[in-house]
Image (spheres, rainbow, N blue to C red):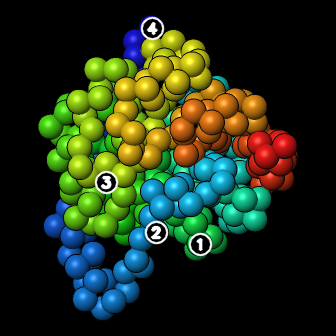
Amino acid sequence: MKDILEEIMAHKRHEVEAAKQMQPLRTLADILDEQCRQEQLRPTLSLNRALVNSSSGIISEFKRKSPSKGWISPNADPAIIAPAYEQGGATALSVLTDAKYFGGSSEDLRTARSKVSLPILRKDFICDEYQLYEARLWGADAILLIASALERNTCIALARKAKELQLEVLLELHHERELEYLNDAVDVVGINNRNLGTFHTDTEHSFLLAEQLPREIVRISESGISDAATARELRQKGFQGFLIGELFMRTENPGESLKHFLQQMHE
């Protein structure tokens, strides 16, 4: 099986170039500068601090579909689910903005931002600084950088540019060899338990890779967390957070599902 990540990134690069033709990077930068001058730009919220100060660390994700599972909740409305997540006890939100593979949009992020006071992660396949300007203008507080999808120097440059734009950086790792991607602009490290070639998930991966991270790094576990007992065990091993989407999004009321999950975590 061809690594789905390669396919997604190829499409994403084409998508970004098309967006630049419609609205050049200089235009986005000028809009951002003008909002700063007019004091219209919302200060960002810290994902790092939210995780450190939380007793659960759940980053609840809004997504309609995924390449591995297909459609999960095609008619999901962020205007309903985002505040339900906040009321249910989420520490932060993750919003998919990729359209082709995850059914997301910029409007999903904008809508979620207007409904909650939690930090919001723009979950997408970042490959160009253009996407960082988009994220800031849409209301994101943090962005995702996937080590497996980027050259090391590119990843570091994007992380530092994100910091210039007052965005925090979640660096996603899959392999031990990607530890060299760590840099001073990274705020949170996410260990993804999914093999991107096979889609198989194994939370044991989080335990093994986390042992090699510097102690002071705020870390979260991503993918394959299907029960509160696993989250509780990961938390006991030093994880400050967990990115969970499908488990909640497959239910009729994601906010209530989150609330129940948290109750089980603290039993």
Q: Residue at x 44, y 46 (%)?
A: 218
Query: In which image quadrant can residue 138 be found?
Result: bottom left
Give the Cα separation between the discs numbered 4 and 3.
28 Å
Labels 1 and 2: the sequence-earlier one = 2
**Residue 198 spot, x, y in % from top left:** 51, 12
> How far separated are the C-alphas under marks 1 and 2?
9 Å
| Residue 45 position (above or below residue 185) | below
Point out residue 191 in the picture as x, y percentages from the top left corner: 46, 32
**Kind of residue at disc 3:** Gln
The residues bearing labels 4 and 1 have C-alpha atoms spaced at a distance of: 41 Å
Image mark for residue 1: 4
Q: Quadrant of the N terminus?
A: top left
Measure the C-alpha gap from mark 3 to mark 2.
Answer: 19 Å
Q: From what the image shows, is residue 140 above or below residue 143?
A: below
Q: Classify 10 Å Cα crowding around label 2: few (below 14), some (14-19), many (20 and above).
A: some
Residue position for label 1: 117
Q: Which residue is mark 3?
A: 131
State the residue at coordinates (16%, 67%): 26
Of the numbered discs 2 and 4, the one sitting upstream in the chain is 4
Is residue 243 visible to us here? no
First-in-chain label (3 vs 2): 2
Pointer 1 with pointer 2, Cβ within 8 A: yes
**Is there CB contact under 8 Å for labels 4 and 3?**
no
Label 1 is placed on what type of residue? Ser
Question: Which quadrant of the structure image shows residue 43?
Answer: bottom left
Please indicate whether residue 134 sits to the left or right of residue 197 in the image.
Answer: left
Q: Nearer the viewer, mark 3 or mark 1?
A: 1
Kindly identify which numbered label has been placed on residue 45.
2
Three-letter residue code for mark 4? Met
Q: Nearer the viewer, mark 2 or mark 4?
A: 2
